[in-house]
Image (cartoon, rainbow, N blue to C red):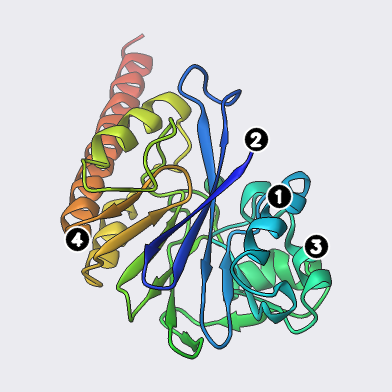
Amino acid sequence: METAISEIADGIFRLSTFVPDIAPPQGFTFNQFLIRGDEPMLFHTGLRLMFPMIHSAVSKLISVERLRWVAFGHVEADECGAMNQWLAAAPRAEVAHGQTACMVSVNDMADRAPRQLADGEAIDLGGKRVRYRDTPHIPHGWEAGVLYEENTRTLLCGDLFTQTGNGPALTESDIVGPAIAAEDMFKYSSLNPGMGATIRKLAEFSPLTLALMHGPSYKGDGAAALHALADSYDRRVIDSVNAAGLMQHDREAA
Ligand SMILES: [Fe+2]
Ligand SMILES: [Fe+2]
């Protein structure tokens, strides 16, 4: 395994490690994003076991001791497993996350106190500016949230649009169809009635680039892709509610 580095927007670098043993035969990528600025930020820490590889990749872009912010979408090993290894490697680094994540998990899990962000709050990275948005339970995790980098109009999507395979670093091809296929395969989302509305709210950013944690980055009409994803989840939620209603009807008729 090796970690490939690509600049997917001005000063935003995708560090991608392909793992062929997950979801074979297509395999699966794990991506971190380094945002270069006066106060560099790493979005997703990677797994603890991948830390040496990802540390080596980050050190090709910045001196790791300069890393100022460590952020991630929700609490899972691939998102934040190496959090404390980064805090140890970069003495000025702080974890930044939403109020729910800090209250429920990060205040206890992080070796240094995190910076707690309100929904909609921004951090100025010096040359880049990231805004945090709560997305509770979407695609999973009560504490889930995303970041939007305003200068490049890049939405750091976390697990939204997850797809299998090892595609190009940056694509202009459809990412919604592959995301629907991966949802069918993994069933990784917490289907809930708020899904469509929450994903449509992200479309208000009108992102030019969507940075996927598992899949290529997408360049194009980000709002249209988010609307299409929201529609697909609304259909999925309605179908599952209808199926539950039919089961209830059958139980009552029996
Ligand atoms: Fe996840
Ligand atoms: Fe993930």
Distance in Å between CA atoms under marks 3 and 4: 35 Å
What residue sits 19% from the left and 53% below the top? 227
Left or right placement of residue 162 versus residue 91 in this view: left
- Return the residue found at the far top: 254
Distance in Å between CA atoms under marks 4 and 1: 33 Å
Q: Sequence-wise, which precedes: disc 2 or disc 3?
A: 2
Give the label, 3 or 4, closer to the camera: 3
Question: Do residues under tags 2 and 3 come within 8 Å of each other at their CB atoms?
Answer: no
Callout 4: helix, strand or loop? helix
Rendered-image quadrant of the N terminus: top right
Question: Do residues under tags 1 and 2 come within 8 Å of each other at their CB atoms?
Answer: yes
Identified by mark 2, the residue type is: Met
Give the label, 4 or 1, closer to the camera: 1
The image's mark for residue 1 is: 2
Q: Compare residues 194 and 122 and report the one nearer the observer.
A: 122
Give the label, 2 or 3, closer to the camera: 2
Left or right placement of residue 123 versus residue 97 in this view: left
Q: Sequence-wise, which precedes: disc 4 or disc 1?
A: 1
Residue identifier under label 4: 223
Count of numbered marks? 4
Identified by mark 4, the residue type is: Ala
Give the label, 2 or 4, closer to the camera: 2
Left or right placement of residue 37 versus residue 75 in this view: left
Residue identifier under label 1: 53
What residue sits 49% from the left and 91% below the top? 126
Task: Where is residue 74? Give x, y as percent.
Answer: 57, 58
Callout 2: helix, strand or loop? loop
Identified by mark 1, the residue type is: Met
Q: Classify 10 Å Cα crowding around label 3: few (below 14), some (14-19), many (20 and above).
A: some
Rendered-image quadrant of the C terminus: top left
